[in-house]
Amino acid sequence: MEDLLAAPARVYVAGHRGLVGSAMVRRLRADGYEVLTRTRSELDLRDATATAAWLRDTRPDAVVLAAATVGGIMANSTRPVPFIEDNLQIQLSVISGAHACSVRRLLFLGSSCIYPRLAPQPIREEALLTGPLEPTNEPYALAKIAGIVQVRSYRRQYGAAYICAMPTNLYGPGDNFDLESSHVLPALIRRFHEAKRDGLDEVVLWGSGTPRREFLHVDDLADACVTLLRRYDEDMPVNVGCGDDLTIGDLAGLVREVVGYEGRIAFDTTKPDGTPRKLLDVSRMTALGWKPRITLRDGVASTYASWLNTGEPQAARRAAVGA
């Protein structure tokens, strides 16, 4: 099989400080690629003119578009405007700018929330645009769907070798542990850590605990993305996941065990659950010879250890007590 992006190609990773982008930088450098990055202060990707100029001056061989405004159910529910506007602006700037300077490969990172709320499980890529979205993250999902359509349009009109990957729920080192904007897994790690630290008898979680979710370590995603950049060049987005899921209640139990919290778990059923189930069909990805290597328990344990090592939990504690 032809290698579509052999090292030492020059790859621009947009969003290199985020969870996905930082994992991509680690993996690409380990594989011998030259990685290009810019911070937001150096290049605001919402600015189409500046983005196009930088890409024209730099001329990378490939772009990994991992930059995005992201967050959990609370952030999506309370601040929907940046989830649609920021992401649309970023995608339009980067994808059009890459094409204008003849970047030969581009990988757009979407999300499993693009699929209908009640899509048949496991969700195949063909389910896209076949039903209503989950209302709690509709702005973000619509922005990501627009990105997929933009990539497809460049493929169809110009023959661009641009592709899309749709990851399941991600976690790992460098995740966002802020309780106001984080996704479920880092939020659970922090909640149980703080409950253990403070000697609380009970942790109350949003929803019923019955929705099922699939989780993939971000380093496994980075491995999958490199596989796609090197081997895949088709119109259809590709799901990236592990092929297994569990309930939020079971996830909470696993995180509680890893953290070592011995109190009770309660659920506030007045709060929203989100999509009932979101398990991806990953047969396209596995057909390329890829499969994940990090188990959920091992991944949660290493993510917790990584967070503790950053010093953030201690800093948050000092701030809370006014130290």
Image: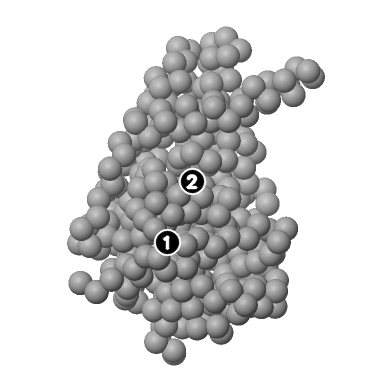
Amino acid type at mark 2: Gly
- Give the percent coordinates (x, y) of residue 86: 65, 63
Query: Which quarter of the rendering shows the N terminus?
Result: bottom left
Q: Which dot marks residue 33?
A: 1
Q: Is residue 144 left or right of residue 221?
A: right
Mark 2 vs 1, N-terminal side: 1
Q: Residues within 10 Å of mark 2 (few under 14, many from 20)?
A: some
Counting from the top left corner in percent of width and height, residue 39 is at 65, 57
Q: Residue at x 44, y 89 (%)?
A: 158
Residue at figure coordinates x 75%, y 17% from the top left: 321
User: In front: 296, or 263?
Assistant: 296
Residue identified by numbered label 2: 274
CB atoms of marks 2 and 1 within 8 Å: no
Secondary element under disc 2, as helix, strand or loop, is loop
Left or right: 321 as drawn, with respect to 106? right
x and y percentages locating residue 186 in the rendered image: 51, 35
Q: Quadrant of residue 138?
A: bottom right
